[in-house]
């Protein structure tokens, strides 16, 4: 949904204007809002419609699959997002580990991170949180991601270019907070789409301005 046209280049991450509130985003969210108004989406702020059997489709994150498969053993299938004529795209990316420049025992922290990055530990974490393993070696440890596996589609989306990374910027918390506020306003409260996205852009750009655009070190 975030992909407007205009003079701004998204990879610079200097503004959300023209992207989050761009014509493609407005059109996409207007379509989703219309689905709600037409009764095609269950209204309300609960995410339990699928789990409680009121809906046959759940448009949600991969982390719901373990819960859904426990609720409906052998009766849950993962399918690609719909293609409305210009291809299909899904998001990718997650939270990361980081090491501060001072105030910590760097050698000890790195040894800990190296341990977490071992294939069996990546696999273990993925089993616990329902995420997709972040390394090929860890993917190979789970039959769910093998050819014919229940969650194979996730791997195909990652390797075939369907998945697009989330904005790689320190402003991401501000971006996700702004959008997470705008989305229910549009979908549940039926707020005007363009005006609501403009508000989200203003919040994001305010954060960018407060941090001078998060310049790279040495720039």
Image (spheres, helix red, strand yellow):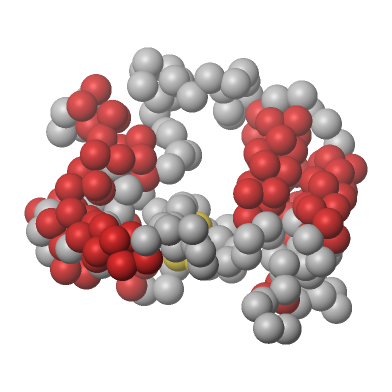
Q: Is 14 left, or right, of 114 in this rendering?
A: right
Looking at the picture, how far across and down is residue 121, in whole percent?
Answer: 18, 54
**For this rendering, which residue is in front, 213 or 61?**
213
Residue at (44%, 20%) from the top-left corner? 48
- In which quadrant will I find the N terminus? bottom right
**Residue 101, position as x, y percentages in the image:** 51, 67
Q: Quadrant of residue 94?
A: bottom left
The residue shown at (55%, 61%) is 166
Tell me: residue 48, above or below residue 23: above
Position of 36 compared to 139: left or right?
right
Query: Residue placed at 36% from the left, 44% from the top?
Result: 62
Q: Position of residue 189 (x, y in %)?
A: 77, 24
- Res 11 → quadrant: bottom right
In the rendered view, tell whether residue 35 sits above or below residue 19. above
Identify whether 197 is placed above or below 190: below
- Residue 21 at least partly seen: no
In the displayed structure, 80 sits above or below 38; it is: below
Q: Nearer the viewer, residue 59 or 180?
A: 180
Q: Residue furthest bottom?
A: 219
Please give left or right for residue 210 compared with residue 33 in the image: right
> At 22% across and 69% down in the image, what residue appears?
136
175 or 53: which is nearer to us? 175
Can residue 169 be seen here?
yes
């Amino acid at each position: 949904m975030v992909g407007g046209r205009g003079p701004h280049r998204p990879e610079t991450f200097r503004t959300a204007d023209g992207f989050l509130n761009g014509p493609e985003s407005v059109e996409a969210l207007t379509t989703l809002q219309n689905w709600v108004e037409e009764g095609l989406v269950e209204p309300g702020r609960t995410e339990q419609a699928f789990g409680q059997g009121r809906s046959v489709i759940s448009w949600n994150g991969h982390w719901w699959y373990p819960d859904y498969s426990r609720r409906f053993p052998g009766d849950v299938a993962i399918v690609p997002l719909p293609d409305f004529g210009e291809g299909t795209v899904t998001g990718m990316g997650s939270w990361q580990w980081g090491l501060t420049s001072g105030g910590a025992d760097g050698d000890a922290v790195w040894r800990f991170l190296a341990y977490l990055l071992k294939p069996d530990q990546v696999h273990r974490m993925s089993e616990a949180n329902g995420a997709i393993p972040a390394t090929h070696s860890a993917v190979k440890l789970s039959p769910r991601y093998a050819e014919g596996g229940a969650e194979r589609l996730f791997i195909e989306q990652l390797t075939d270019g369907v998945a697009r990374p989330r904005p790689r910027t320190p402003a991401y918390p501000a971006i996700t907070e702004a959008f997470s506020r705008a989305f229910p306003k549009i979908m549940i409260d039926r707020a005007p789409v363009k005006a609501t996205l403009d508000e989200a852009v203003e919040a994001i750009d305010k954060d960018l301005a407060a941090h001078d655009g998060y310049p790279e070190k040495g720039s």
